[in-house]
Each structure stands twice: as structure tokens, then as C-alpha cells.
Amino acid sequence: MLNGKLGENHLPKGELFDGENSNSSFNKPDDFVKVYRAPYTKIAQTVNLTDNPNVVDNKKALWIYKTANPQRSVYVNFKDDKKYKSVKLSIDPLTNPVAFMQAYGNSLIEIETKTDLFFATELDFSSSNTSKSVKLETLSVAENKITASKNVSSRKTYDSAQLNTKIRVVAENGRSIRFKANNCSLNAIQFEFYSDFITHANINGDWTLKGKYGLATDDFKVFEQLEPKLNAVHGKWLKFNDDEYVNTKNYKAKWNRPTVANDITDENIKDIVLEYIELSKSGNPKAEKDIPFGDRVPINDPKDGEVQQYAENLTNISYLDLLNIVMNDYHVARMLGLGCLDIDEEVYDGEYVYLTEYTTFGSLEEDIDGKEVQHLSMSIPTSINTERMPLPIQLNKIVPGLNVDSDENPNNRITDPEGYSFDGKKRFVSLFMDDVMDYDIVNPNSKNDFFKSSLEYEGSNFTFPVYLGIDHKIDSEKTWKSPELSHDIEYKSVNQNLKESEFETVPINIPESGKSVLNAIQEETGENTYIYQGYGINIFSRATSGRQISIKSDIKPANNLMPPSNMNALLVTEEKPLQFTSQSEQQLLDKITGPDKTLVRIMFDYYSAQELLSYPVPKEMSVVEAKTKESIFPDDKEILADHFKLYYKDGLPEVEYGEIESIDNDSVDNLTSIVKIREYRIISSGQQVKIGLDNTNKTRFERGVLTIGDQNYIIKNIEVKFKSDGNSNQVFDYALIEVLKKK
């Protein structure tokens, strides 16, 4: 990956640029990154702190040691000024550094190299005390500039047993080491500098050219970079866990799959590479382009006889940015010449160091003319046993509903408060995660940021995740469900037998702090405990799982059946001849012997409109599969009518009359409005119309009807408010009627 201005404006184009070297851009012919490998050999410089320092600056509490390289010095900074000045009163550091160190005790010391970066150190602490310990941090920088900010790339406490031998610390781009030593002092420190190793390997001819890499459009070359040896990746590289493996056929399809002609929104990776090359030839390094996005936008308000005018709804995209995004998938990165696999037999034994070389001619800084610059980047020593797995993704809570408890848009009332759909057949939950750990940034003006966190880590042992994934299952299942929640139905992974298995997992972008990771849908009927587990995915498409969290759900369909329609009731009476009744009904009437001879015939319509169930067929399911009893939703769990209950009243419905004072359409529930009513006086007669609602009888009106003019509204809830009359009695004041809105 290229960084800085270079990374923001360029990708190595291989042989795809046929112009001249440019000082105004980074375009050039033969545009490749070269990758070299060399066996690791320890090349170290030792600074003996028992020797007298070459320079002592007591005002700055600083010692300077010269090294064998005359251009390089090592700076020992004593960060506790008061302690330094106190010790200096009795001990001269220039002539007795050992005694000074011992007297300085467990106060903070920082040892820094200002000109060269190191990748490893070894520290020798001496003491026979069995209670000795050392707190140590390494500080690293993004680039070798003295002004570059420092990050804490490792933080660790070493106990007495560990300090009985030299401790080795590996840190990428190390600038300095700081520590506090208890009951011991530092005798010597060895530094392994990047520049020393490179020089040594150059002199001894240790570098082996692995290859040169850049963009290409030749399918054979691209697929060779994807998999340099048959089945070296296919069916061997996990995708990302759970015994699912990379299917290289998917990547080949993504590279040059058929697309719709002249549809700019339907491009394969090869199309994007070609467009990037064409657009970035001159004056457009990021290959930016306006593309139509959605419907055209009206730009005038036409009057009679005028024509409606439209503007294109354009969105600016950068093809360079698109390529930089997809290269976070390591297998795509190799196809783009931004990565490689080393499967030579010799690397199976010992440690090796890798070096990338790239040359630019363009300007790397604003207002500075471009010139030829060689860029080198070296890895830390690595072997086939070095994994550097990503940090895990730690899920921390499950919240019912969609995006609840975050600063995103709240639940849009497509569920009840517990996240269940209104038909009861699904439950929606939002998953949240802890923020991914990052290196602490050193504040140069603070004297209290050493070990400011109790979290200890070694940055050389892990990588940071660029994506995440979510495993899921119910507690009765022994293995995680496949496919995963985020998957692509166009592609399938393979198993160890190289047979296509489940739909390919799609990595999930790591959200901003406080945002939900994923909205999950639960559909297993009955009461179950749903278990979720996050995992981090690094730039090499390797995964590390985090903690498991769970939630209990009870999925059962709601009874949303519609009642019978066109209900008609007819009182059966004696009639001769028969006109409105049948002979059988007359016979039933004759059989009634009691005093109440009421016989009523009730007729109604009940057909498919009352209980018709309609489901869309999921894309990943065939029509044949959709017709099975257990697909989509189990047939035996559906709510279907098998009998009817008839209710009757022996009187007319209760009615209350009132005056509407206000209507609030912006209630908490978007589906309802609040109507406020009071008692009123009829102007013509002066009659006071009373309302008899109270907390006892109000439930009789709930699920009833509120009539306003010629419109009827279903009542959901009633809240009655009271006031005191002249005799201190509580009497009706007003009522808040919550009714369902109409479409």
C-alpha cells in the first residue's frame, strides 16, 4: 500500500502507461513495485550504559552516546527533572553513570534514536534482587521525520524471571523506548536498525528478487498473481472461518464477469482498472468522474405551454478510491499487483525479511518540484510460524429493534418496542461492539502519559482488523449457521473437498463509534436463545473471533386474521308462504319451547381475502424449495381460522358526546393521533353536555370508534383527566383519545 500524497494520487500501473516520466504526476513507464527477500541475520549496535556518555546536558537531563556509525547518536532522556537534579547533587553522570542510574531508581527514562528507525532491541537489566520488574513501552512513528508523532506500539510489564535474561522487543518503525525499572538498572541496549540490515544484505548479496508488481489487464497474468500455483489458495485459504474456504472462481468472475453494455453502474474489476488508467493519464490522478445516480432532477416550474427541464443527478466518484477499497480484500489486492504470495520451499525454514522498492519522479510535497526518489519499506523478521492475527471484534450488547440506543435514526416503528414484527413472525435486533483498540498517541507536553492505560500489548504480534464478520446460531445448535448473516447469493465458497458449499461471506465495514454493527433478523419459531459472535478480519483476510453474547426470543405469529365481512342478521319469524326463511328454519323455530322464542339467522362472507398469506420468494431459494412445508415459514405454525366466535349485546352501544379542543398528529407513535375532548354547552338551548368517562368505564370504549364528522377512527387508548369542583370533588376535566391514523 502506498501512503501519503503518493497513495492518495497513484497506484503502480505496471506496463499500462506508455508515456514519459512525469514530474507533475506519478505516471511513468515500467511502473512496478519490486519485492525482495533476504534471510534474517541479526545486525545490531550496542550502547553500553555503564560507559561514560559522550555528552551530558544536565539542563535538559540528557545523555548522548555516540555509536560506531558517526552519523548516528543515541539520546538518553531522564524525564523526571526533579529526581535528576537531586541525584546530580551527589553523583556526576559524566564520570559515574552506573551509580547515577541506580540512584535515579524507578523514574522514567526514554532512549531515542533521532536519525534512524529500529525494528528490534535487546535490553540487559542487571540486579540480583528477586523482586525486580520493568514497565516498558516502545514508541513508533509513521515516517522517519523528527516531527512525526509517536504512538505506543507496545506496552508490557516484565517480571523478575523474565529479566534474568535479555529481553527482546520487536517494534515496527521504532523511534524510542521508555521504561521504569524497579530494583534494577539498564546496563546495555542493542538496536537493530532498518538501514543497517539493508546495507548488510546489499553488501553480502542476500536479496532475492521475488518479482515486480503493478496493475495489469491481461487475464492470465492477473489470475497467476491471484494463485501462483494450482490450489495453493483455492480450497486452502479460510473464508474466514467455520470450514469455508476461498473459491478462486469467484474472484475470476468478479474480475471479468459479463456486464450490461453502457451501464456505468455495472462494472467488473477489470473495467474499473481500465477506466482508472484512461482517466488518470493526464491531470486527473484520482481518476474522478461524474456518473448519473438515480432519477434526473427537475430544475424549473413549467407554466402552461412550457416544457419541464431536468438536470442530471450526478455523483462524483474516484476510480482510484474504488480500487483502494476493494484491495482491502487480500485476494483482490494480489490481482491488482498490490500483494504477493511467497510459496518457495526455502522459506519453510528460518526467518526472512521482505523489502519493497518503488521509484517516483513526481512531487511528493506541495510547491516542490518532483525528482527521482527511491522508496524502501522493510518488514520485521517473519517465518511460516508468524501469524499476526487480527484483533478480535468484541460484541457488547444486543438491542431489540433497528438501530435503537445509537445516534442513528431511531426505530421507524416497523416493530413493537421489543423488536418483534407486527405479524410476530420475525424479531429484529441491533448488534453493537466495543471500539477497536488503537495505539495511544504520545503527548510530548505531558509527563503523565506513560502507561496511561492498563492494557498491555505487543504490536508486532497482531494486526488491526479492516473488516468484521458475525457468526450466529441458536443455543440448541453445535455449530455456527451457514451462510452467515452477511453473504452474497451470487457466489459460493468451497469446502476442504473443493466442492461448492455455502454462499460466500461478505465482510462488514467496521462502524463508527456508537453505531450499530448489523441489524439481524431472527426467524426460528418458538422460544430460543440466539447467540452471536463477532470476528475481526485483517488485510490478509485472516480472522480472529471475539466473545459471544446472546438474547432470548419467542417467535410466534400474531393473530392478524381479518374478521368476516358483509355480516347480515335476520330475525326468523313464522311466515306462510315462505319468503325470507326456509322450511328448516321454521322447523327450528317450532322446536323452541321456552318463553324466549328468538331465532336469528346470521350470514357473512369469509374467503381468501380474510386469511390469504403471501410471501416473496427469497433470491437464494428456488420456487420448488419455497413450496415445501418448512420453507420461508413453517406451515404448521401459521395462524389460520378453524372456527368463529359470535358476540351479541342486549342493548345499544354506549355513546359519549364531546367537543374537540385539539388534535396532535405528532405523537410518540407515528401511527396514532391524540384527540383532546371536553364537555360543551349547546348554544341554542344552553344545555350542558356532560361526559361520563372515568377510569372505571373508559376501557369499554377502547377498541371502539371515535366519530368525527363522517369519519370513524379506531380508539387505541383513553386517558381521563380530572379537576376539583367547588366541593373538592374530583370531576371530569378532559380526555385524551389516542386513535389510529388513516392512510
Image: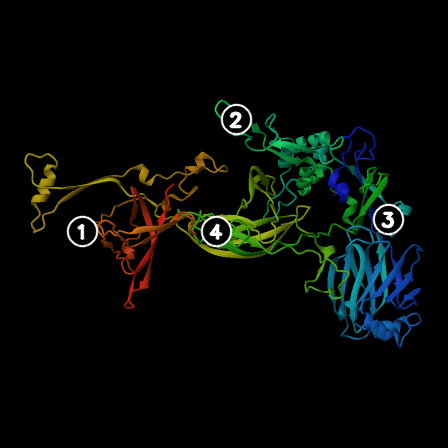
Q: Secondary structure at mark 2?
A: loop
How many marks do you count on the picture?
4
Earlier residue among tags 2 and 3: 3
The residue wearing badge 2 is 308
Earlier residue among tags 3 and 1: 3
485 or 313: nearer the viewer: 313
Q: Position of residue 327 (x, y in %)?
A: 68, 41
Earlier residue among tags 4 and 2: 2
Q: Which mark is residue 476?
A: none
The residue wearing badge 3 is 198
Q: Which of label 3 and label 1 is nearer to you?
A: 1
Check the image and name the residue furthest to the left: 576
Q: Which of label 4 and label 2 is nearer to you?
A: 2
Q: Position of residue 441 (x, y in %)?
A: 73, 57
Q: CA distance from mark 4 to mark 2?
A: 43 Å
* Residues tagged 4 and 1 counted as in contact (Cβ below 8 A): no
Amino acid carrying mark 3 in the image: Ile
Q: CA distance from mark 2 to mark 1?
A: 62 Å
Q: Secondary structure at mark 3?
A: helix
Q: Which mark is residue 401?
A: 4
Earlier residue among tags 4 and 1: 4
Q: CA distance from mark 4 to mark 3?
A: 56 Å
Looking at the rendering, in which quadrant would you find the N terminus? top right
Amino acid carrying mark 4 in the image: Gly
Q: Residues within 10 Å of mark 3 (few under 14, many from 20)?
A: some
303 or 138: nearer the viewer: 303
Amino acid carrying mark 2 in the image: Gln
